[in-house]
Image: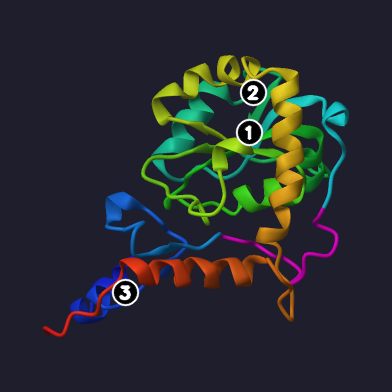
Amino acid sequence: GPETSFSVPYLHKNSIRVLCNANTSERFNPAKDVSFPEINLQTGSINGFLGGPSASQRPILAFFAGGLHGYIRAILLDHWENKDQDIMVQKYLPKGVSYYEMLRKSKYCLCPSGYEVASPRVVEAIYTGCVPVLISDHYVPPFSDALNWKAFSVEVSVEDIPKLKDILMRISPTQYIRMQRRVGQIRRHFEVHSPPKRYDVFHMILHSVWLRRLNFRVHNDQ
């Protein structure tokens, strides 16, 4: 997306870009561009993906499983892969273990950037009632002009990956319960419906584009 938009300078200058790869280090401009949530719908529908147990029914502190690509995941796996039963980090799950069931058993779902800053894990966490932990550099979360991400997620800098357990353990049970409930409250803004439903992801994207018009001016120069 970013590379394609740069190939036509006039178009890049005179458009509001809607990008999954909302990476400010790659000239994503939060004042003009829109961060698009990355959503992986394996069946083409959200049926069966939504919902999870309450905070008290989640025995795992934090969970991540995924392929090794990008420098951030390499750091995460180096520090935490199979090192701590509270921080369950591994490249691949054993055969027969459901990825989505692991999300539903976890209090926090780790969402490290891969080759790009965005990850479908953020929305997967929200769908399953797991508090997302954003581990990235230069990422602008979707709809951050309307949603207070600090109220329902945790941001961890790359340099603080070794302190990950300490950071999560310092969050009180009361604070965690509040965050987990808020994940349930904002979930509708990331849901995909056909036809779209009020306040769902389609309308949120249009709302973000509509807001950007205030910061946008067409340049006549070529």
The secondary structure that dominates the magenta segment is: loop
Is residue 200 in view from this perspective? yes
Q: Is residue 176 magenta?
A: no
Of callouts 2 and 1, the N-terminal one: 2
User: Who's the residue at 49% across and 66% down the image?
Assistant: 208
Q: Position of residue 136 (x, y in %)?
A: 44, 40
Q: Which residue is mark 2?
A: 82
Q: Which mark is residue 90?
A: 1
Q: Which mark is residue 4?
A: 3
Q: CA distance from mark 3 to mark 2?
A: 39 Å
What quarter of the picture does the C terminus occupy? bottom left
Label 2 crowd bin: few (<14), some (14–19), many (20+), radius 10 Å: some
Of 34 and 22, which appears nearest the observer? 34
Label 1 crowd bin: few (<14), some (14–19), many (20+), radius 10 Å: many
Q: Is residue 49 magenta?
A: yes
Give left or right: position of 67 versus 200: left
- Residue 14 found in image quarter: bottom left
Mark 3 secondary-structure assignment = helix
Instruction: Determine whether 169 is above or below 218 in the image.
Output: above
Label 2–label 1 contact, CB within 8 A: yes
Amino acid type shown at disc 1:
Gln
User: Who's the residue at 51% across and 22% down the image?
Assistant: 79
Q: Which residues are magenta?
A: 38-50
Give left or right: position of 213 versus 91: left
